[in-house]
Image (cartoon, grey):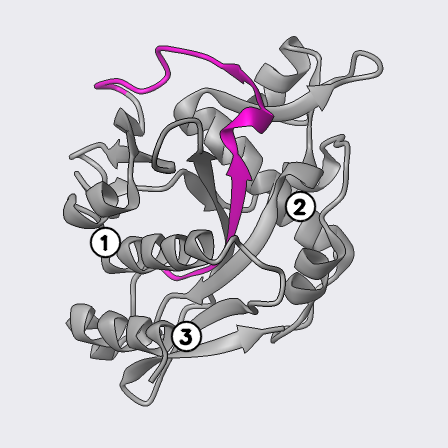
Amino acid sequence: MSEFSELAKYLTRSEPKAKTKGPYRRPRDAATLILLDRSGAEPKLLLGKRHEGHVFMPGMFVFPGGRLDPEDRRMKYTGALDPVSERRLLAGSPKTSKARINALALAAIRETCEETGILVGSEASEPFAAPSSGWQPFADAKLTPNLGALTFFARAITPTGRPRRFDTRFFVADRRDAKIERGGVAGPDSEFVELKWLTCAEARSTNTPAITKVIVEEVEMRLKAGFPESVPASFFYFRNGQFHRGELA
């Protein structure tokens, strides 16, 4: 059995509540961005510790991300997702559109800015109005989010029966594509109380949810292989009492 299949088995073992019966809730579109710092001997990933007061994953280290907002569809941007990422994002069920997958990439960039103060973008050709407060830092800095900096590599859907369900697309980007890193965003009154750049080994050993550990493993395996386009994107979903890993080629 492949290493990727073992990740699906790990999710099933680590998520006993996944078998809990409950009312059906449609998963909400969400996006996550894994920022890579490859300036040192080992690549490092940016994770944030969630506030202890949060209902969802309190006190855990996770990657920046969140649900898609309607205003993300109206945000100006530069660049474009690479053709392979675009094809894989359009694959699977339910069917989606190019506008929707662009908005998901934008959501990943916006959430990263809101939670970490890091802006992945390019210089805007002219001033523009932000469609929401979440995008205001880009307008203030005269930057537009750069979709060309992102690569899609995984998708995961929360099992049925959970009080909160997300259909999350995972993107990766290099820290070098961050034009601005604002300090003071994380703190005791923020969504993230602490930010850490961790190696994959360090991230695996810290207090993270099962899905975050699986994504760390995904990133590590792909990094060791040089992040080749030939490796399909992973698709984790729950069926018949266990997680499965599909592929989006």
Q: Position of residue 226 (x, y in %)?
A: 52, 53
Q: Between disc 3 and disc 1, whose residue precedes?
A: 1
Asked if the magenta segment contains residue 188, the reply would be: yes
- Residue placed at 40% from the left, 38% from the top? 64
Quarter of the N terminus within the rendering: bottom left
Earlier-in-chain disc, 2 versus 3:
2
Horizontal and vertical percent position of residue 80: 76, 43
Q: Which residues are magenta?
A: 165-189
Judged by depth in the image, the label closer to the viewer, 2 or 1, is: 1
Tell me, for residue 209, which label it has, or none: 1
Q: Residues within 10 Å of mark 3 (few under 14, many from 20)?
A: some
Task: Residue lying at the far front in this picture: please name it.
Answer: 41
Q: Viewed as shown, does residue 138 lie left or right of 237? A: right
Q: Are marks 2 and 1 in contact (CB under 8 Å)?
A: no
Q: Which residue is painted at 18% across and 34% down in the image? A: 53
In the foreground, 199 or 246: 199
Quadrant of image for the C terminus = bottom right
